[in-house]
Image: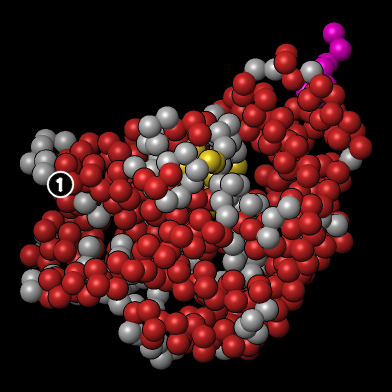
């Protein structure tokens, strides 16, 4: 029996999924395993695969099949209609972007990765600046062609590639509300916590002990090590596809919770990815609905659950088992005060729940200035330092090294990931904080872990994949867009 146009499209996009999965794993390898001197070779490999993806999406065959499938859409189920919508969206993005631009970006970002790491280690932003300038220039070109094709502002056309339906106006509105409240809230929290500071956790914890603890925590949470793995890198990140998820983190012998919190953050995203619908795993509708939702699950696990008393009550015996720790500084209440302590810091990855949004808002402002051409890349370190002084009353002394983190590697995710992270945090927190408050009252329950993990296990978000679209259905109640399929706006309030 002959296949319908829609069925033929599914086959084409199954091939595209395989190519994109290979690209993702090559990026993981670049950060974890690849020798630095191989960056040029890796750039060519990524450019070749990106070219294949572009050729498939822009082929006359795919466009012809999309038109025929649309003409017969009455015969499709709801999820297939959503899949067809996502296919068309990917096709439109690809047609708008010239192949030469795609391959140049692939090569430039691969080199930028290596030079970012070198600049960070040498504490010399000048080593990275020319590579970042090239990526910025190419991305501006991409924004212009996408803007014309999608009818969006250039910056919004870039956001659309990572969180469809979000606009910079949504983010600006959210940030405007938050920046009015955060400075006083941070100051009040620091003053209140100073009345009862936590006992310091001194001494070093070996990397091997931290690795063992991280693996056991991930295993108990439910991370399937037969379909994923944990490695180490200069930065924490998650890559891969459904069925093969790769996590990387960084450890610090002097800060035993840095690696664990990073693992929890990335495990949150991995569990989201692994929770996507298996039946749609190789189709556009089966992918994540944007980085905002992915990040919301990361922050839910790291910031809300991972720092709650029930979770720490459950974690305490594992700390003693793997770290051999004893003493009052390792008691649950002191760990809770340590991990929820508000501090002004220049390191985003180590930021607390209140100052974390300040880091994101600063990066958002800086990247918009760079891409709008109002600030040259060479001025980024000083602008970063001045921004911290203005927003947190903190003037970092080692600004060039940290400024490199602002647009970190100049890769395909940066700088656009920054624009959705606070939106993601805002989505994760209000509902989850109520859950945490209830869980914290139940610290004497027999199953402390169950009280802490219930929010994560009940999350329904991944099961829809990209079936739903974003819409402003909540109005003034949430001030950001939510999913049409969420009913009572469960993703936001």
Q: Which residues are magenta?
A: 1-8
Q: Residue at 60% of width from left, 42% of height from top?
A: 241
The quadrant in which the C terminus is found is top left
- Quarter holding residue 351: bottom left
Give percent across and percent down for residue 321. Answer: 21, 53
Check if residue 484 falls in the magenta segment.
no
Residue appearing at x 49%, y 63% in the figure: 172
Query: In the picture, which quadrant includes the N terminus?
Result: top right
The spot of residue 356 in percent (x, y) is: 37, 66
Q: Residues within 10 Å of mark 1 (few under 14, many from 20)?
A: some
Name the residue carrying label 1: 440
Front one among 491 and 230? 491
Instruction: Report whether residue 303 is seen.
Output: yes
**Is residue 255 or residue 204 the one in the foreground?**
255
**Rendered view: 207 above or below 482:** below
Please, which residue is most extreme toward the front here? 476
The reply to whether the magenta stretch includes residue 5 is yes
Q: Residue 158: in sight, yes or no? A: no
In the figure, 32 relative to 270: above or below? below
Residue ID at (30%, 67%): 181
Secondary structure under tag 1 reads: helix
Q: Residue at x 30, y 39 (%)?
A: 455
Instruction: Give the colour scheme of this rendering.
Output: secondary structure
Question: Looking at the image, which residue sits at the far right?
Answer: 60
Residue 328 found in image quarter: bottom left
Residue 204 place in picture, x, y as percent: 27, 73
Q: Position of residue 292 (x, y in %)?
A: 50, 50
Observer-nearest residue: 193 or 231?
193
Counting labels gives 1
């Amino acid at each position: 029996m002959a296949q319908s146009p829609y069925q033929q499209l599914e086959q084409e996009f199954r091939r595209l999924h395989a190519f994109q999965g290979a690209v993702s794993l090559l990026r993981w390898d670049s950060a974890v395993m690849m020798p630095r001197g191989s960056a040029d070779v890796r750039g060519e490999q990524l450019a070749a695969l990106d070219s294949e993806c572009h050729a498939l999406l822009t082929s006359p065959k795919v466009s012809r099949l999309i038109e025929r499938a649309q003409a017969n859409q009455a015969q499709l189920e709801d999820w297939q209609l959503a899949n067809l919508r996502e296919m068309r969206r990917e096709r439109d993005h690809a047609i708008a972007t010239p192949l030469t631009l795609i391959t140049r970006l692939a090569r430039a970002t691969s080199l930028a990765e290596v030079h970012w790491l070198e600049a960070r280690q040498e504490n010399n932003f000048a080593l990275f600046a020319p590579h970042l300038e090239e990526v910025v220039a190419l991305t501006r070109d991409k924004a212009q062609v996408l803007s014309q094709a999608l009818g969006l502002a250039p910056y919004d056309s870039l956001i659309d590639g990572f969180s469809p339906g979000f606009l910079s106006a949504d983010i600006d509105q959210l940030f405007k509300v938050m920046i009015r409240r955060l400075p006083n809230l941070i100051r009040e929290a620091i003053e209140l916590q100073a009345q009862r500071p936590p006992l310091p956790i001194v001494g070093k914890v070996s990397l091997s002990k931290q690795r063992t603890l991280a693996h056991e925590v991930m295993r108990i949470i439910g991370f399937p090590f037969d379909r994923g793995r944990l490695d180490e890198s200069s930065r924490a990140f998650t890559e891969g596809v459904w069925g093969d998820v790769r996590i990387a983190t960084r450890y610090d012998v002097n800060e035993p919770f840095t690696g664990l919190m990073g693992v929890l953050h990335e495990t949150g995203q991995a569990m989201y990815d692994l929770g996507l619908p298996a039946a749609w795993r190789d189709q556009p509708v089966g992918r994540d609905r944007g980085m905002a939702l992915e990040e919301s699950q990361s922050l839910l696990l790291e910031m809300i659950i991972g720092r709650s008393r029930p979770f720490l009550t459950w974690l305490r015996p594992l700390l003693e088992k793997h770290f051999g720790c004893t003493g009052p500084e390792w008691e649950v209440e002191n760990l809770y005060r340590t991990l929820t302590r508000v501090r002004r810091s220049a390191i985003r990855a180590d930021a607390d729940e209140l100052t974390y949004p300040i880091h994101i808002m600063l990066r958002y402002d800086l990247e918009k200035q760079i891409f709008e051409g109002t600030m040259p890349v060479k001025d980024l370190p000083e602008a970063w330092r001045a921004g911290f002084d203005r927003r947190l009353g903190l003037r970092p002394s080692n600004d060039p090294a940290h400024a490199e983190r602002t647009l970190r590697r100049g890769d395909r995710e940066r700088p656009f990931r920054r624009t959705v992270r606070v939106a993601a945090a805002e989505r994760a927190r209000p509902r989850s904080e109520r859950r945490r408050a209830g869980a914290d009252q139940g610290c004497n329950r027999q199953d402390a872990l169950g009280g802490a993990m219930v929010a994560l296990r009940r999350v329904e978000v991944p099961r829809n994949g990209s079936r739903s679209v974003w819409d402003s259905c909540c109005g003034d109640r949430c001030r950001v867009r939510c999913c049409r399929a969420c009913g009572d706006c469960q993703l936001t309030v």
